[in-house]
Image (cartoon, rainbow, N blue to C red):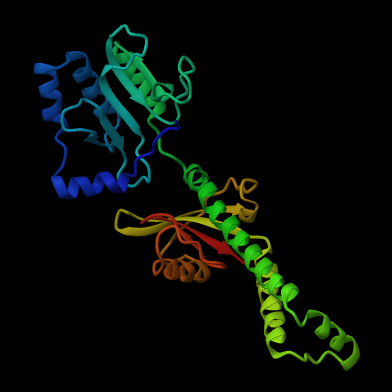
Amino acid sequence: MSYKHVLVAALEKEETDDGPFDLSAFIANERKHGSDVYATFLEALAKKLPTCKFRKITASGSAIHVYLPTDHFVLGRVGWGDWSVDGKPTKSIMVQSPRIRNDKYCSDRTQHYMWTSINPKRALSNALGALRSHTPIAVAKHYASDVASKVWHSDYEGQDKVSKVRGNVIRHGSLEQELRGIVASGYTFINAEFSDRVTAFLHEADEYAFRQQKVDMLYVRAYMLGEQQVFDTVPIANMHKHYDFTVEESSPRYTEDTLPDDIRGKLSMLLMVAMKEYVDDVGMRVNEEVFYVTQS
């Protein structure tokens, strides 16, 4: 089981719907009824990460999401409880992040992505090392496999269409007659239905040949940074190769004023189609913020 990312947008919507999370009141309650160790840790963490927001994961638990409002994914989670799997219950402070690899546990366990400590200073050090923003390149890589799969599937559908119309031509009862006619009479089809099938076959073959061309894409995340809309981008080459694409190590950022017209036009088109629907020569919309647009 891989690390489960949480969208910041989902937590911000929770805050809009249910109201903000009062971290100070939570810390006071933990100090009074829960754990003074955990409360001390949270106070120190909030001071070290003054621009971060916090949100409880469940109403009754102690675990908390830590995130920056302008990020796409949550930085990670912290909590107080028993995280062991060896049958020896021991409460400790937990820090969970996709940056953590705890090789004491298999990668299919949630503990593989956790550090735990009973010492609040040690736990704080763990948190500050692990709770960091995901770069645009990291987010682009996260979604790229699913998008490349859609590109590949579109190509597979093209192959299937070509195969079916080719079969219609091959199985037609006038095939021999038409081939003789092509040879003998200057390429004028004798049977109108056969002519239509040949035309359909050549059309699908041409469409498939077009889709076989190299597909490069651009990851785009559109979001508000303060009062300004910005667009983080990452180029990705060879998305038609399914698992053999290349995410480039560059991430240009555009504003509403500097966004190229080609990208702007494709984003507008993708806003009119369903989420995760791949459109040939345009791209795909992954969620409310993330798009992959084709590059000419």
Residue 273 occupies quadrant: bottom left
Front residue of 249 and 289: 289
Front residue of 19 and 281: 281
Q: Hey, which residue is sitting farthest front in the picture?
A: 173
Q: Hey, which residue is sitting farthest right in the picture?
A: 184
Residue 22 occupies quadrant: top left
Establish if 11 lies above or below 101. below
Q: Hey, which residue is sitting farthest top in the picture?
A: 88
115 relative position to 191: left or right:
left
138 relative position to 182: left or right:
left
> How far from the left and from the top, in percent, is residue 296?
62, 67
Establish if 108 lies above or below 70. above
Q: Quadrant of the N terminus?
A: top left
**Residue at point 39% right, 21% down?**
111
199 relative position to 282: left or right:
right
Establish if 4 lies above or below 250. above
> How far from the left and from the top, in percent, is residue 194?
71, 84
